[in-house]
Image (cartoon, rainbow, N blue to C red):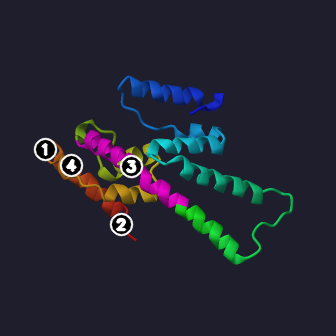
């Protein structure tokens, strides 16, 4: 990926940390807001989106830009045309969310493992640890929370703090119950 100078240093730092085998998080993701939307869409290669999907995502951005222009053109003249566009946008969002699940599960796994020792974590209470460290630090959305809630934690049963891991997973489910 080629970014403008606004974001390039951030990306290079991230890539260097990966190359050195260091743990990385995606924060601060807001740096990417400095980049052109069409360029950022290329990052979806990292979550296994193919080039055709990325073209579709870019087409939605282009379409949005055209209809938001103040030239007075009206692009959608029927409710069917609007509904079709909305359905396409929702389909793209769902596709990105599904492909993001592996990353969300990795974030949640790292969070659970690093938070299992109550004495050595940021917050003693589970709710604050979840909201501040898992959700806020990783920019976790409600859809991401739903993904994390479904993660099987039994592979962590050999961990010394497995009881605390279970409590954290349960606290997430209680704080964000299914609708």
Q: Which residues are magenta?
A: 92-116
**What residue is at 31 percent from the left and 59 percent from the top?**
150
Task: Left or right? Give the position of 81 relative to 164.
Answer: right
Residue 158 numbered tag: 1
Task: Left or right? Give the position of 76 relative to 2.
Answer: right
Residue 177 falls inside the magenta stretch: no
Density class for disc 1 (Cα within 10 Å; few <14, some 14-19, many ≥20) is few
Q: Which residue is mark 4?
A: 164
- Which of the 4 image quarters holds residue 118? top left
Is label 3 in a helix, a strand or a loop? helix
Density class for disc 2 (Cα within 10 Å; few <14, some 14-19, many ≥20) is few
Residue 49 image position (x, y, % from top left): 49, 48
**What residue is at 86 percent from the left and 58 percent from the top?**
71
In the image shown, does 178 or 15 lie closer to the viewer? 15
Q: Considering only order in the chain, which callout, 4 or 2, is on the residue closer to the N terminus?
A: 4
Is label 4 in a helix, a strand or a loop? helix
Q: Residue furthest front?
A: 52
């Amino acid at each position: 990926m080629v970014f403008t100078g606004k974001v390039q240093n951030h990306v290079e730092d991230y890539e260097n940390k990966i190359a050195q085998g260091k743990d990385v998080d995606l924060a601060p993701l807001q740096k990417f807001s400095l980049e052109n939307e069409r360029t950022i869409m290329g990052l979806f290669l990292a979550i296994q989106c193919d080039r055709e999907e990325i073209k579709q995502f870019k087409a939605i951005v282009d379409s949005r830009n055209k209809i938001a222009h103040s030239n007075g053109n009206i692009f959608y003249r029927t409710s069917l045309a609007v509904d079709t566009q909305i359905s396409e946008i929702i389909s793209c969002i769902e596709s990105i969310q599904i492909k993001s699940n592996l990353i969300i599960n990795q974030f949640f796994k790292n969070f659970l493992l690093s938070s299992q020792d109550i004495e050595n974590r940021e917050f003693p209470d589970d709710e604050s640890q979840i909201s501040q460290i898992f959700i806020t630090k990783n920019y976790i959305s409600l859809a991401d929370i739903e993904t994390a809630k479904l993660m099987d934690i039994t592979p962590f049963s050999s961990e010394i703090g497995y009881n605390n891991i279970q409590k954290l997973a349960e606290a997430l489910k209680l704080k964000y119950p299914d609708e």
